[in-house]
Image: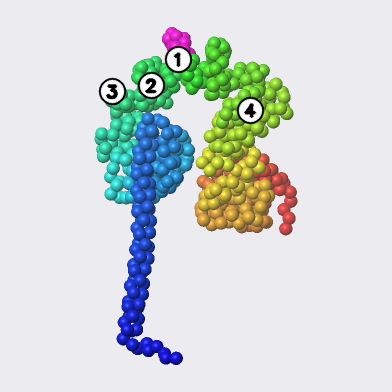
């Protein structure tokens, strides 16, 4: 059978055409594939670009919407718009600014975090950094405000805004002279800013120098002609006159003028009413009637008026007024709270119990339970009162503001044990712990409560490990109470070697040496103090103890001087033992 010859010209041409067609097909497929891929990439880019454009458009639109709502005072609409933006674009600077403003207006400390986020973002402005500092000052975070101001660029520091915030920081630190200088500079750099003039006037009004005070008063009097600042200026002038204990008649004239201003608030009118009462002015009764009529349909004003009447000792008059009001307004918070306070001041436990036995004061329901506990305790129903008090404590524990409110209420009742319990609860909140521990320290020191002082100092030492005074006091108290003595001796030694000339540190160190039997070393440490330092009663007491341990006859004179010191029970026992040891024979 004959074979095909592949080398024939016809076959070669056919094979060539097939190969060319195959290459063309491959190139076409490759072009189509690459074209399809490019189309897909282009489509994705178009979609992504379109989405990014959509997000930018929505961000701009909603942020503007939120800003307009803020200007109109519509916090709810502003919040909804800002949240919608943050869901689309969490890093949105505009929405974060709105969130910060909303938090500041509602007293929410989250404002500081929002301001920090904006101030640390790319393309932030100097004003964003200053807003962060102002927010920190609003919530008492002086350290954060200081840190924020330090981040302002040098070129942005020669502005009225920078010096205004620096002045606020100085005021927070009670540096009145520095605050006055900063406000002066702020006014120099931004003379058109009347808000700075207002603050400068107030700052100068608080100065000791009569010339400065006169200058401040003049600035504020000038601002009283400006409708936007006349109310604030008048308040500052009135506050200063009251602080200086000027005659009621002088203050009354300013208050009379203030309450005539269109922007004067209900508290401004209450101030005028209070001054009328103090001056025994014939206008008092008619003006009180006028305020009662004005407040009878406004729950906030009504609660303020009732509270003022109660504090002014007009409780029976307040109750007569309450009887004329419809139940609808009496049931609206914060009116029931003001009425409860009146019943508590009148010690009308039965009516107070009926008012607070049921109902729901919403987020203030913990106060309803507290007032109910007061009513039950007044009727000597101790067990029931205890249960209501526990409920009040639990209800207030969710927020420092609630705990602070509960503290004020129980303090006004003179409930000492409960006040301390609330103060310990308040100390759990970072923003309140320093103030709470200071109050607790003063209370336990006043009552010579060593165990209470130890608890406070132990917590303060954790919070302030670098504070030598706190570490020293804790070490001393630990040694007196024989609590963690070895650790106390170690701390006392470290503190002393950091500042050996400090008499208090030397005394604690000497006592630490004494507690482990090293009387000679203890005596040397105390003897190294100056004669003037040894005259201080508290130092004399411990020097006397050291000398008594050495059987030194000078011990009695120092122990006698130590009796003038404010001593804890354990310290009194220590001195008594030292005296007794002097009467016993010396052993070798």
Tell me where residue 148 appears, x and y as whole percent: 39, 47
The residue lying toward the viewer, choosing from 469 and 95, is 95
What residue does disc 2 label?
264
Q: Left or right: where does residue 552 sit relative to residue 61?
A: right
Q: Marks 3 and 4: which is nearer the front?
A: 4
* Residue occupying the point 42% across, 18% down: 269
Tell me where residue 531 appears, x and y as whole percent: 53, 48
Q: Is the residue marked by circle 3 packed among few (<14), some (14-19), or many (20+) residues within 10 Å? A: few
The residue lying toward the viewer, choosing from 461 and 267, is 267
Q: Marks 2 and 1: which is nearer the front?
A: 1
Q: Secondary structure at mark 2?
A: loop
What residue does disc 4 label?
369
- Mark toward the start of the polypeptide (2 vs 1): 2
Using the numbered discs, state the Cα–Cα distance from disc 3 to disc 4 in whole angstroms: 49 Å
* Residue occupying the point 62% across, 20% down: 355
Q: Is residue 287 magenta?
A: yes
- Mark toward the start of the polypeptide (3 vs 1): 3
What residue does disc 3 label?
225
Q: Is the residue marked by circle 1 packed among few (<14), some (14-19), or many (20+) residues within 10 Å? A: few
For the question of whether residue 221 can be seen, the reply is no
């Amino acid at each position: 059978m004959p074979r095909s010859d592949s080398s024939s010209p016809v076959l070669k041409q056919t094979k060539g055409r097939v190969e060319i067609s195959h290459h063309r097909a491959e190139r076409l497929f490759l072009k189509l594939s690459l074209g399809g891929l490019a189309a897909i990439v282009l489509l994705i880019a178009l979609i992504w670009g379109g989405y990014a454009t959509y997000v930018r458009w929505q961000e701009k639109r909603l942020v503007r919407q939120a800003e307009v709502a803020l200007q109109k005072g519509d916090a709810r609409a502003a919040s909804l718009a800002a949240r919608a933006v943050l869901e689309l674009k969490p890093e949105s600077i505009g929405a974060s600014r709105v969130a910060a403003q909303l938090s500041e207006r509602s007293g929410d400390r989250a404002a500081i975090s929002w301001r920090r986020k904006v101030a640390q973002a790319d393309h932030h402005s100097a004003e964003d950094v200053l807003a962060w500092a102002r927010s920190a000052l609003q919530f008492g975070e002086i350290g954060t405000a200081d840190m924020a101001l330090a981040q302002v660029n040098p070129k942005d520091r020669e502005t009225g805004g920078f010096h205004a915030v620096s002045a606020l920081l100085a005021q927070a630190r009670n540096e009145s002279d520095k605050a006055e200088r900063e406000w002066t500079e702020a006014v120099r750099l931004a003379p058109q800013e009347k808000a700075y003039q207002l603050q400068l006037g107030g700052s100068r009004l608080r100065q000791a120098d009569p010339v400065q005070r006169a200058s401040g008063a003049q600035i504020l009097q000038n601002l009283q002609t400006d409708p936007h600042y006349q109310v604030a200026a008048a308040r500052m002038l009135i506050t200063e006159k009251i602080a200086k204990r000027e005659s009621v008649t002088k203050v009354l004239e300013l208050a009379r003028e203030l309450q005539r201003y269109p922007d004067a608030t209900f508290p401004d009118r209450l101030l005028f009413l209070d001054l009328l009462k103090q001056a025994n002015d014939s206008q008092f009764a008619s003006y009180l009637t006028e305020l009662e009529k004005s407040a009878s349909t406004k729950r906030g004003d009504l609660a303020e008026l009732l509270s003022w009447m109660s504090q002014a000792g007009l409780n029976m008059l307040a109750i007569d007024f309450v009887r004329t009001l419809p139940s609808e307004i009496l049931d609206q918070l914060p009116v029931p709270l003001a009425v409860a306070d009146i019943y508590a001041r009148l010690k009308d436990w039965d009516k107070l119990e009926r008012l607070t036995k049921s109902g729901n004061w919403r987020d203030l329901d913990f106060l309803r339970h507290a007032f109910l506990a007061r009513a039950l305790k007044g009727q000597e129903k101790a067990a029931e009162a205890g249960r209501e008090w526990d409920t009040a404590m639990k209800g207030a524990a969710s927020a420092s503001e609630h705990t602070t409110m509960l503290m004020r209420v129980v303090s006004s009742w003179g409930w000492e044990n409960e006040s301390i319990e609330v103060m310990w609860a308040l100390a759990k909140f970072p923003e309140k712990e320093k103030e709470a521990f200071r109050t607790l320290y003063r209370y336990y020191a006043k009552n010579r409560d060593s165990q209470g002082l130890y608890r406070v100092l132990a917590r303060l030492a954790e919070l302030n490990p670098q504070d030598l005074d706190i570490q020293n006091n804790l070490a001393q108290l630990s040694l007196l109470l024989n609590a963690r003595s070895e650790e106390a001796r170690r701390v006392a030694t470290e503190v002393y070697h950091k500042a050996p000339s400090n008499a208090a540190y030397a005394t604690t160190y000497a006592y630490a040496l004494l507690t482990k039997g090293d009387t000679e070393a203890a005596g040397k440490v105390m003897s190294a103090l100056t004669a003037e330092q040894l005259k201080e009663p508290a130092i004399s007491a411990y020097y006397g103890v050291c000398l008594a341990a050495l059987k030194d006859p000078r011990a009695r004179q120092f122990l006698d001087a130590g009796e003038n010191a404010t001593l804890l029970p354990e310290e009194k026992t220590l001195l008594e033992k030292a005296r007794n040891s002097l009467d016993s024979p010396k052993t070798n």
